[in-house]
């Protein structure tokens, strides 16, 4: 394991228990090993070779959603999610991934489109895609599903690359405001292409020349989260090479945005690449962040009155610190009545493959989110992450709640 920074040193954990008050997993199962305080002790023991970094240890590490809620309340100013990621990387370097995980990671790196098509084909088989209740958040999560009863998302036809031009100009009557490149991510590229199309359309109507870059890799977040830092860094370098020539890079996926902004940290072992990554990350903005910062809120938009609430994706609020921008947009739109949800920043329960590998805990966390939505009386819940979008859709359907679930770009494009 690489040398730890001060905020990544588990030995500095005060064992105060503040993390226990905010951890969504501990709030369900009350197991000490599944909250930052207890996990830090186990990581310390593994570092001192008091316990083996074997499969049971790796299983315990998998119970962290990486939501960062514990970091916000930690008096020692630790980053428990980074401590857990470093521990996962150490376990990966000692015992590796399963053959299936390694195969999927390599396919995601070199054959992303082919892997997406394979998943799309699998979704056609009823025995595997049984009930539409367990969507994947990232292609890399496919490595975790074959031992579970899980349905695959339906492949968009056509995929985003074939829906939009490489360059989408602003309308003729719109004053040009500049140029932006979009980073669609795997989900908007292959499985929710209509939302990816909405993102490009709204940016163009706002006066921007929208560039769809060729040759992008997966953002690398899902691969990085399981501890395969090497593959994640390769993905990061490829994306930096392709996107560094653009002045601004916009993504509608909170998870992708958190990865793109973290590339400097991922590549910290290589000074040249880290410097490039830090410069690149300054250009990256979430879709809602970009639209609000640029002052384009579509205040003249008219539509039927709609009561809405907003769910904060962990990768947007906790990882990127973006909280006001989506609310600014929603409050500026005439006809919308915005209702703040109780614990809007609470995790929806998906957490990538967590929603598959720890299904019961994940659904209990999801139940809390659905109850919070229900109490608002909202007709629609808006979010900025395709994973959260799919998982909240699942929860709304499971609870029979008559509520629309929309990405904020869909609302602006409607």
Image (cartoon, helix red, strand yellow):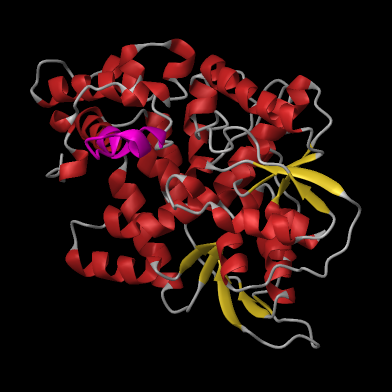
Magenta highlight on residue 80: yes
Write the residue at 21% across / 34% down.
90
> Going by the image, does 219 lie left or right of 330?
left
Q: Which residues are magenta?
A: 69-84
Task: Give percent across and percent down for residue 132.
Answer: 72, 28
- In the displayed structure, 22 sits above or below 229; it is above
Q: Is residue 133 visible?
A: no
Write the residue at 27% across / 22% down.
37
Write the residue at 17% across / 17% down.
52
Q: Main secondary structure of the magenta part?
A: helix
Write the residue at 83% across / 58% down.
414
- In the displayed structure, 307 sits above or below 347; it is below
> Going by the image, does 83 lie left or right of 404?
left
Task: Give percent across and percent down for residue 285.
Answer: 50, 64
Q: Is residue 359 visible?
A: yes
> Going by the image, does 408 lie left or right of 50?
right
Name the residue nearer the viewer: 344 or 65: 344
- In the displayed structure, 201 sits above or below 404; it is below
Task: Give percent across and percent down for residue 200.
Answer: 68, 67
Name the residue nearer the viewer: 177 or 161: 177
> Going by the image, does 82 lie left or right of 384?
left
Looking at the rendering, which quadrant does residue 76 occupy?
top left
Q: What residue occupies the far right of the structure in this picture?
A: 304
Task: Give percent across and percent down for residue 354.
Answer: 48, 27
Looking at the rendering, which quadrant does residue 263 occupy?
bottom left
Magenta highlight on residue 115: no
């Amino acid at each position: 394991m690489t040398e730890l920074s001060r905020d990544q040193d588990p030995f500095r954990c005060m064992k105060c228990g503040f993390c226990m008050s905010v951890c969504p997993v501990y709030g369900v199962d009350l197991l000490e090993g599944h909250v930052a305080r207890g996990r830090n002790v186990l990581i310390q023991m593994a570092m001192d070779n008091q316990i083996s970094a074997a499969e049971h240890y790796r299983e315990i590490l998998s119970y962290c959603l990486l939501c960062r809620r514990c970091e916000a309340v930690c008096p020692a100013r630790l980053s428990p999610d980074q401590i857990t990621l470093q521990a996962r990387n150490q376990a990966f370097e000692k015992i590796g991934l399963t053959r299936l995980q390694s195969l999927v990671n390599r396919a995601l790196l070199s054959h992303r489109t082919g892997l997406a098509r394979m998943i799309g084909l699998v979704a056609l088989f009823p025995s595997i895609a049984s009930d539409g209740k367990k969507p994947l958040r990232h292609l890399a999560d496919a490595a975790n599903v074959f031992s579970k009863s899980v349905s695959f998302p339906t492949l968009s036809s056509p995929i985003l690359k074939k829906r939009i031009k490489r360059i989408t100009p602003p309308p003729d009557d719109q004053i040009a405001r500049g140029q932006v490149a979009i980073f669609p991510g795997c989900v908007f590229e292959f499985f929710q292409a209509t939302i990816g199309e909405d993102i490009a359309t709204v940016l163009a109507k706002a006066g921007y020349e929208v560039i769809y870059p060729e040759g992008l890799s997966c953002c690398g977040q899902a691969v990085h989260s399981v501890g395969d830092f090497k593959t994640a860094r390769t993905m990061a370098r490829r994306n930096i090479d392709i996107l560094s020539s653009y002045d601004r890079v916009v993504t509608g996926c909170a998870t992708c945005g958190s990865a793109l902004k973290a590339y400097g940290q991922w590549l910290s072992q290589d000074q040249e690449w880290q410097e490039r990554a830090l410069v690149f990350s300054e250009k990256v903005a979430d879709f809602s962040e970009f639209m609000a910062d640029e002052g384009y809120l579509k205040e003249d938009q008219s539509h039927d009155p709609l009561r809405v609430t907003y769910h904060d994706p962990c990768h947007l609020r906790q990882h990127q610190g973006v909280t006001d921008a989506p609310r600014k947009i929603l409050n500026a739109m005439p006809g919308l009545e915005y209702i703040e949800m109780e614990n809007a920043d609470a995790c929806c329960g998906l957490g990538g493959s967590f929603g598959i590998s720890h299904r019961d805990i994940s659904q209990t966390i999801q139940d809390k989110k659905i109850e919070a939505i229900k109490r608002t009386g909202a007709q629609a819940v808006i979010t900025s992450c395709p994973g959260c979008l799919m998982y909240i859709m699942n929860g709304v359907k499971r609870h029979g709640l008559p509520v629309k679930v929309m990405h904020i770009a869909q609302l602006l494009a409607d």
